[in-house]
Amino acid sequence: MFKRLLSKDVEEFAVGLALDFGKRVSPDTWRKGTRPSVLAKAVDEVCNRAADFQRTRVLGVYGKAKFGTAVKLQLKESGYPDEFVNELTQTLLIRISARPEQPR
């Protein structure tokens, strides 16, 4: 039962993250040519939030897969092109898979 609750939390966070990204850079704005700085800032923000979530929840392989799938489906549903969806999802998964920095 605990796994199901965690899975639901992961999915809700991922969908919310994708929706928040859509508020910053809508699919229509993206197609028209978003300024690179605006896009980079939005991507960086969602990556940082995903990394923070990973640090508090410590997602395993299943949790990361659930996260990636939920983000990807929400971005596609929002109307982003497949190539962009795949690239952003991959970037997010790499970010949450990175080892946390060790204090010196």
Image: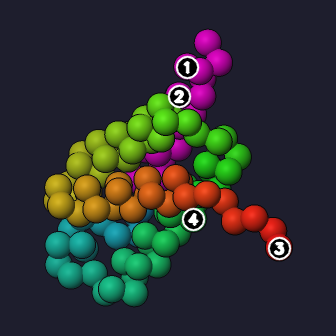
Which callout, 2 or 4, points at the residue further toward the start of the chain?
2
Report the disc number at residue 4. Answer: 1
Q: Which residues are magenta?
A: 1-19
Q: Which residue is mark 3?
A: 104
Which callout, 4 or 1, points at the residue further toward the start of the chain?
1
Quadrant of residue 3 in the image?
A: top right
Q: Quadrant of the N terminus?
A: top right
| Horizontal side, residue 7 vs residue 83: left or right | right
Q: Secondary structure at mark 1?
A: helix
Query: How far apart, in angstroms, are the residues tagged by discs 2 and 3?
Result: 34 Å
Q: Quadrant of the C terminus?
A: bottom right
Amino acid on which the number 3 mark rests in the picture: Arg
Residue at (21, 68) in percent of width and height: 28
As for residue 39 lying within the magenta part, the answer is no
Q: Is residue 59 above or below residue 6?
A: below
Residue at (69, 65) in percent of width and height: 101
Is 103 in front, or is 86? 103
Circles 3, 4 touching at the beta carbon (< 8 Å): no
Query: How far apart, in angstroms, are the residues tagged by discs 2 and 4?
Result: 20 Å
Circles 2, 1 touching at the beta carbon (< 8 Å): yes
Q: Secondary structure at mark 4?
A: helix
Report the disc number at residue 66. Answer: none
Quadrant of residue 27 in the image?
A: bottom left
Mark 3 vs mark 4: give the one in front: 3
Q: Which residue is mark 2?
A: 7
Residue 56 in view (yes/no): yes
Residue 56 place in picture, x, y as percent: 70, 46
Is 50 in front, or is 21? 50
Q: Which residue is mark 4?
A: 48
Circles 4, 1 touching at the beta carbon (< 8 Å): no
Is 58 in front, or is 85? 58
